[in-house]
């Protein structure tokens, strides 16, 4: 059985402080749009967007940031695009910054997603790997990605993607030796892959009906300049069921599978309430259900629950140690109705004292 890996003890979460700050930020955003001029990012018809982001989790502690972007429309029959920059900083002196684009043109026959990111993450462990040793690590990350999809049928898209990243873990003394022994030393990786997508959502960013399916792979190879050769496969299916007066039940089933991956390329939990990278295994799957309730034209609420599994073989999911439940609730504000951009404030809880608060741009799926 392939046991998940927890990289160490985590400081206690301080959700009340961050939750109060997040609510204050959300309230500051939701000023009456009628009071904004047409050039204000808060005007729902403005092509400009600026949104604060907040998160609190046991790994990065409390983080604040901002996303600022422009929403062009390349032709009348295409989905509104976004070109944006972002930055975030935490009270552990960790930070990320980058730019990205999500572009639609040719009456949605063409889709391009691309971006680059760089950052530094500082971790403090009270009990690293159960050894009782206090430890610190400093991880650096640089990455660039691009994906192109072309419509090949009424609802189907086919394309390819490329991803290149540099991930390094820095640690001193005994900890550095431990990380080297278990393979958590980071690596350079470059990969190519294919993407197949089926799209029937009525809005790609804030769907109220329809479904979305995407299957993809990344083949990381030393011949492309990486340190390791391994494969990653992923499939996601999301379905959106309208009910009542404007409410939506969103359901997602996802999986990530690896072949010959080093420990740094393993799969991790991708459910709200858990920190990415805290638990690792070769493969991962989850079911996530998100009920979204319309309270008014711009405001909504959500409750959600999910169950994930990290495994080496599917039989591992019969053991409770490999199962990771998640549940929580959130508040939704529709910032750009036509483009489908929302701001969500979510509080989520998992097992073993895992919990987090997020103020983010966009629906989780």
Image (spheres, rainbow, N blue to C red):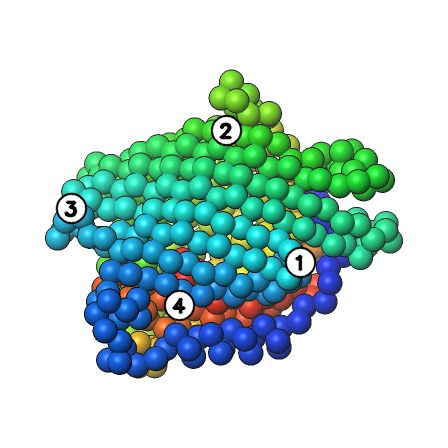
Q: Give the quarter of the image for residue 347.
A: bottom right
Query: Along the horizontal axis of the image, is 276 left or right of 191?
Result: right
The residue at which mark 1 appears reads as 92
Nearer to the camera, 282 or 70: 70
* Marks 1, 3: nearer the viewer: 1
- Residues at marks 1 and 4, CA–CA distance in whole angstroms: 25 Å
- Residues at marks 1 and 2, CA–CA distance in whole angstroms: 29 Å
Mark closest to the chain's N terminus, 2 or 3 = 3
The residue at which mark 2 appears reads as 190
Contact? badges 1 and 4 (CB < 8 Å): no
- Residues at marks 2 and 3, CA–CA distance in whole angstroms: 32 Å
* Marks 4, 3: nearer the viewer: 4
Mark closest to the chain's N terminus, 1 or 2 = 1
The residue at which mark 4 appears reads as 343
Contact? badges 2 and 3 (CB < 8 Å): no
* Marks 1, 2: nearer the viewer: 1
The residue at which mark 3 appears reads as 107
Q: Residue at left 47%, top 71%?
A: 345
């Amino acid at each position: 059985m392939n046991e998940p890996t927890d990289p160490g003890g985590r400081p206690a979460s301080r959700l009340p402080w961050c939750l109060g700050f997040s609510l204050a930020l959300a309230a500051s955003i939701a000023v009456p749009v009628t009071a904004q001029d047409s050039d204000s990012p808060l005007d729902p018809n403005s092509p400009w967007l600026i949104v604060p982001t907040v998160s609190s989790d046991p790994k990065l502690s409390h983080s604040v940031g901002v996303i600022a972007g422009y929403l062009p429309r390349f032709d009348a029959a295409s989905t509104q695009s976004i070109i944006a920059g972002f930055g975030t900083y935490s009270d552990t002196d960790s930070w990320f910054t980058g730019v990205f684009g999500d572009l639609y043109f040719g009456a949605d026959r063409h889709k391009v997603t691309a971006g680059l990111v760089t950052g530094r993450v500082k971790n403090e462990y009270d009990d690293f790997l159960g050894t009782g040793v206090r430890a610190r690590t400093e991880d650096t990350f640089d990455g660039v990605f691009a994906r192109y999809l072309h419509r090949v049928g009424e609802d189907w898209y086919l394309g390819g993607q490329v991803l290149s990243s540099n991930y390094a873990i820095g640690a001193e003394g005994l900890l550095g030796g431990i990380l080297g022994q278990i393979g958590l030393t980071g690596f350079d990786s470059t990969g190519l892959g294919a993407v197949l997508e089926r799209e029937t959502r009525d809005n790609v960013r804030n769907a109220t009906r329809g479904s979305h399916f995407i299957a993809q792979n990344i083949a990381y190879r030393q011949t492309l300049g990486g340190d390791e050769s391994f494969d990653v496969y992923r499939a996601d299916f999301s379905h959106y069921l309208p009910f009542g007066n404007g409410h939506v039940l969103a359901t997602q089933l996802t999986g990530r599978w690896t072949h010959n991956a080093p420990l740094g390329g393993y799969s991790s939990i991708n459910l709200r309430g858990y920190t990415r990278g805290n638990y690792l295994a070769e493969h991962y799957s989850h079911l996530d259900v998100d009920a979204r309730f319309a309270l008014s034209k711009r405001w909504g609420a959500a409750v959600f629950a999910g169950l994930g599994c990290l495994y080496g073989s599917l039989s591992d999911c019969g053991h409770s140690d490999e199962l990771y439940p998640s549940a929580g609730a959130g508040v939704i504000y529709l910032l750009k109705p036509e483009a489908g951009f929302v701001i969500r404030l979510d509080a989520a809880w998992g097992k073993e004292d895992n919990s987090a608060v997020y103020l983010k741009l966009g629906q989780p799926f």
